[in-house]
Image (tube, helix red, strand yellow):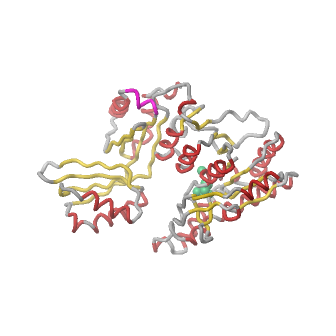
């Protein structure tokens, strides 16, 4: 069982989580619980590290001491939940990442789990104790705390489930995965099931319900995942939530399953690039060396002979750094101009049905055209189409696409 920040936001909610855990224990199950920090805590901790001057030196996201600070929120909620369970008469103890251990690599701030050694944990659970695990954190081979990136408790939970060989129920503040963000489109529908692949695209394209890495892991290890609401009492109809599973397990076929969006985008445009081999390699090599994550990339021939134009997108926070890096290779590459626009949003439609159906792109472009939304960049994969548009049209585009694919009447 995994509980997110809003589910453990205060002591009353922690007591409700304890009741849900107890109900599983009463039903005869062994339980491992992964918890996030109390809502807002991690943001506060991150702000403190920024305030300490680390950000000014470009350290905040990569420093081992950053991880020491931001991992502490989960320690608090794990301890509080274990205490609450004990007060209810249920044997429980908390586990920090290093105590299990959850071994992670040393890319601080966005570490990957290398390995989990679940023997001690399993033995304690066999002895009848609920294991309350601090999410978001692991330990490097040389004994330092490492965090798994924002939203990383989902990944902790799926990884623990994979190590223990069980399923993973993610309890959160929504009762499942929706066709789109219900705050934007009130007609959004809860999906009974979604495939790993679609969930992976939804998560990486902006749906915040699960961390992308956790879905990758679930898919790789075949961990059955359910997304459920934590705002219920044991015994109350919890609803079925959404099951994330293999495509083959989904009988009801649809062409498009969801519409996702992200406002965390910036577009960088390069004009007048020389059109010869090695140019892209130099530019994206420099960006990769600086750990800038690039998303959409388009290049096209310019009207003037022997030159090309190129546009790519990065996260908003990386925009200025990306421009600086591109400028630093300008003398060797020799382009004319670089511009940045961070008033853009990416809207995507996702569905495994695209593999076998034609006309999905046509419907998307038609729906956007009907609303007068201009498309700046398009990118596709086998099961998704993304467009970059003016950020002001995000809601309009999401609603138009949701309707265009009939997602309100699934
Ligand atoms: N507390 C961490 C965060 O806010 C990890 C998580 O909640 O999953 O990003
Ligand atoms: Mg989360």
Q: Quadrant of residue 186?
A: top right
Q: Quadrant of residue 20?
A: top right
Left or right side of 370 for 257: right
Left or right side of 341 for 84: right
Tell me the residue at 36%/45% (across/down): 388
Q: Which residue is the extreme one toward the right?
A: 89
Is residue 149 in view? yes
Query: Magenta part mainly helix, strand or loop?
Result: helix
Q: Quadrant of residue 393?
A: top left
Where does residue 376 sit, x and y in percent of width and height?
31, 44
354 inside magenta stretch: yes
Q: Is residue 298 above or below residue 192?
A: below
Where does residue 349 sit, x and y in percent of width and height?
43, 36
Left or right side of 8 for 284: left
Give the image quadrant in which the ligand numbered 1 is located: bottom right
Q: Is residue 239 above or below residue 202?
A: above
Which range of residues does the magenta coloring cover?
352-357
Q: Nearer the viewer, residue 403 or 280?
A: 280
Q: Nearer the viewer, residue 409 or 240?
A: 240
Q: Is residue 46 above or below residue 355?
A: below
Tell me the residue at 57%/54% (across/down): 151
Where does residue 207 sit, x and y in percent of width and height?
51, 44
Tell me the residue at 74%/56% (across/down): 121
Q: Nearer the viewer, residue 350 or 104?
A: 104
């Amino acid at each position: 069982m995994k509980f997110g920040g809003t589910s453990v936001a205060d002591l009353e909610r922690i007591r409700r989580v304890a009741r849900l855990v107890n109900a599983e224990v009463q039903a005869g199950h062994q339980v491992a619980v992964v918890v996030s920090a109390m809502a807002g805590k991690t943001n506060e901790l991150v702000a403190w590290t920024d305030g300490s001057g680390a950000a000014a030196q470009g350290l905040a996201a990569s420093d081992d001491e950053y991880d020491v600070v931001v991992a502490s929120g989960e320690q608090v909620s794990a301890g509080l939940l274990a205490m609450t369970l004990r007060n209810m008469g249920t044997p429980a103890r908390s586990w920090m990442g290093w105590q299990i251990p959850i071994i992670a690599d040393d890319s601080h701030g966005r570490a990957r789990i290398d390995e989990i050694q679940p023997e001690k944990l399993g033995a304690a659970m066999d002895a009848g104790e609920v294991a309350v695990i601090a999410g978001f954190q692991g330990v490097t081979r040389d004994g330092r705390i490492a965090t798994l990136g924002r939203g990383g408790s989902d990944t902790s939970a799926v990884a623990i489930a994979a190590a223990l060989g069980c399923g993973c129920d993610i309890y959160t503040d929504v009762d499942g995965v929706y066709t789109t963000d219900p705050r934007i489109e009130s007609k959004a529908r809860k999906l009974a099931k979604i495939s790993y692949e679609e969930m992976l695209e939804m998560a990486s394209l902006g749906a915040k319900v699960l961390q992308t890495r956790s879905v990758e892991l679930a898919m790789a290890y075949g961990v059955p995942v359910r997304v459920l609401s934590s705002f219920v009492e044991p015994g109350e109809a919890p609803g079925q939530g959404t099951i994330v599973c293999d495509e083959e397990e989904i009988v009801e076929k649809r062409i498009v399953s969801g519409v996702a969006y992200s406002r965390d985008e910036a577009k960088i445009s390069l004009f007048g690039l020389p059109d010869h081999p090695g140019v892209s390699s130099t530019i994206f090599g420099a960006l990769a060396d600086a750990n800038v994550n690039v998303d959409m990339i388009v290049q096209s021939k310019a009207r003037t002979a022997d030159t090309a134009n190129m546009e790519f997108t990065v996260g908003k926070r990386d925009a200025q750094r990306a421009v600086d890096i591109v400028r630093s290779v300008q003398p060797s590459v020799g382009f004319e101009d670089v511009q940045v626009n961070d008033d853009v949003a990416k809207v995507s439609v996702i569905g495994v049905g695209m593999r076998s159906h034609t006309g999905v792109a046509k419907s998307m472009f038609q729906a956007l055209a009907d609303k007068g939304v201009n498309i700046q960049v398009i990118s596709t994969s086998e099961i998704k189409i993304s467009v970059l548009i003016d950020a002001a049209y995000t809601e309009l585009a999401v609603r138009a696409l949701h309707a265009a694919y009939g997602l309100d009447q699934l």
